[in-house]
Image (cartoon, rainbow, N blue to C red):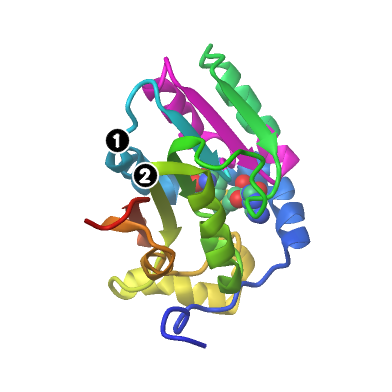
Amino acid sequence: MDKMTSGILESRYTQDEIVRKYNRIAPVYDLFGVMMESKARRRAIEMVNIRNGEKVLEVAFGTGLSFVEILKRNPDGWVDGIDISMKMLRKTEKRAARTGRRNYTLHLGDCRRLPFENETFDVLINQYLLDILPSEDFIPILLEFKRVLKEGGRVVLVNMTKGGNRINRIYEDLYKLRPPLLAGCRGILAQPYLERIGFNDFKREFVSQCGFPSEIITGLKRLPH
Ligand SMILES: C[S@@+](CC[C@H](N)C(=O)[O-])C[C@H]1O[C@@H](n2cnc3c(N)ncnc32)[C@H](O)[C@@H]1O
């Protein structure tokens, strides 16, 4: 284990198990998503500062809670979304249809093989995905994110994180005991992985909601000046 991954607990599920799990919990996911994650999700969208007219990708859109916010901020741009769970995709389809917008496509697929050309997007948003996946997959996935971002493109990652106060750390203790209680997520620190593959200009914020600890990290794909 190197310095980057030290302290990050092992993920508990295979990718097939994750798909089955998220298909199963799609109908009730919003409860968890709104109660514990809505603050960080909202702040991430503010921090990445989507400008109307941009090309935006959301990876792992889940039930579409952020996807519809992105659509609202980008009426003259284009938004793609990708998620591996068909049940999540169906929920997001309904939510996005209610916005009345048509400037988007939802894709079913794996973040490890994004079905987009190199340098397609101005902004890539990814929330609460890496914290359920094995840490050895982080670099290949983030390289894929980097590939589809334009030079100068912005990434924002939101994940359950480590640290904070004693209450925040209860969630990590719960994961050790009964991972299903937390939809399989454990605390991670994503910035060192982004640094390793050449993102820069980072901003990091820590958000606690109902004691659930999240980190928001924004970074830029560009050569350091
Ligand atoms: C914890 S949920 C987060 C959903 C949403 N981003 C949010 O913040 O509410 C994780 C999502 O990642 C999706 N997912 C899991 N593995 C994936 C993969 N390899 N590629 C794309 N999506 C994946 C799941 O289907 C699920 O919708």
Pair 2/1: label in front: 2
Q: Which residue is mark 2?
A: 154
Q: Describe residue 69's horizontal placement relative to residue 99 as left or right.
A: left
The x, y position of residue 5, in whole percent, is: 47, 79
In this rendered view, identify the residue nearer to me: 8 or 186: 8
Q: Residues within 10 Å of mark 2 (few under 14, many from 20)?
A: many
Q: Residue at x 45, y 84 (%)?
A: 6
Instruction: Determine whether label 2 and label 1 are within 8 Å by CB.
Output: yes
Residue 220, given in percent of the width and then of the height, sits at 33, 50
The structure residue drawn at horizontal position 57% and vertical position 25%, both measured from the top left corner, is 95
* Mark 2–mark 1 distance (CA, rounded to whole Å): 9 Å
For residue 209, say whether it is visible.
Answer: no
Q: Which residues are magenta?
A: 61-89
Left or right of 24, for residue 163: left
In which quadrant is the C terminus drawn? bottom left
Front residue of 75 and 222: 222
- Give the farthest residue toward the top: 100
Say what secondary structure mark 1 lies in: loop
On screen, residue 80 above or below 158: above
Q: Amino acid at mark 2?
A: Arg
Residue 112 lies left or right of residue 172; in this view the side is right
Compare marks 2 and 1 and give the one earlier in the sequence: 1
Q: How many marks are shown on the rendered structure?
A: 2
For the view shown, which residue lies furthest in the bottom direction?
Answer: 1
Quarter assignment of residue 80: top right
Secondary structure of the residue carrying numbered label 2? strand
Q: Furthest residue to the left? A: 225
Tell me the residue that label 1 is attached to: 49
